[in-house]
Image (cartoon, rainbow, N blue to C red):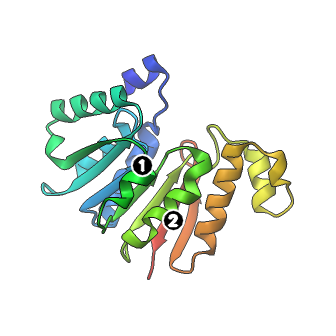
Amino acid sequence: MAAHGEESAVPTVGPAVGGWLALLARLADARRVFEFGSGFGYSAYWFARVLPADGEVVLTEVDEGELDRAREYFEQGGLADRATFEHGDAIETVAAYEGPFDAVLVDNEKHRYGEAFDAVREKVPAGGVVIADNVVGGPIDFEALVGIVAGEGDPAAADADTRGVADYLARVRADPDFETAVVPVGEGIAVSHRTD
């Protein structure tokens, strides 16, 4: 999978973040996981490996070819029975699902991160986690992000991805039912643990 990511220039969370995803899923005692944006299944594979035999990870992807590749990888790894593959917009897809989702990965279009959180918030039980990737690196401008989050930068001067991540961080940090920390691993993950 890692080789495909490098050859095709499709970004992945990488093994350091993958290890964190698996750990967070274990700590949340996750049975069900939802991913906003799955690509060819790299991050979902980290989740699936630690789910119980009757667990489920829902992969969403707008690129049908990448989703088909994810299905192939899951079949080769003997984990296809733990995966549901959904082609289409992740935010529209999650609306069709009942919760709970014990772990959620937000890794779709950065300008839609806040929308993704709003769409899944009520489906995450106490003890569950919402994880957002690319919150300190990747397609965002870190210096502009820090300025916006600190209230010193001009959001209008930042690109849409940076504004989207800043908006997401403001939402999850202001939500009284979640505790959020930014972990500087990979391109940065925001981990939001539901406390109530």
Q: Nearer the viewer, residue 29 or 72?
A: 72
Circle 1 SS class = helix
The structure residue drawn at horizontal position 46% and vertical position 70%, both measured from the top left corner, is 193
Q: Quadrant of residue 102?
A: bottom left
- Three-letter amino acid code at disc 2? Asp
Reply above or below: 6 against 82.
above
Q: Which residue is mark 2?
A: 118
- Three-letter amino acid code at disc 1? Ala
Q: Earlier in the sequence, mark 1 or mark 2?
A: 1
Residue 60 disc label:
none
**On the picture, is 164 further left or further right than 15?**
right
Q: Nearer the viewer, residue 38 or 189?
A: 38
Residue 90 disc label:
1
Q: Residues within 10 Å of mark 1 (few under 14, many from 20)?
A: many
Q: Quadrant of residue 73?
A: top left
Q: Position of residue 153 (x, y in %)?
A: 85, 55
The structure residue drawn at horizontal position 38% and vertical position 21%, both measured from the top left corner, is 3
Reply above or below: 146 against 40.
below
The structure residue drawn at horizontal position 19% and vertical position 57%, both measured from the top left corner, is 55
Circle 2 SS class = helix
Q: Position of residue 11 (x, y in %)?
A: 49, 31
Extreme residue in the top direction: 7
| Quadrant occupied by the N terminus | top left
The structure residue drawn at horizontal position 43% and vertical position 64%, both measured from the top left corner, is 120
Residues at marks 1 and 2, CA–CA distance in whole angstroms: 12 Å
Q: Position of residue 172 (x, y in %)?
A: 58, 68
Q: Position of residue 126 (x, y in %)?
A: 38, 77
Is residue 51 something one can see in this rendering?
no
Q: Nearer the viewer, residue 183 or 60?
A: 60
| Quadrant occupied by the C terminus | bottom left
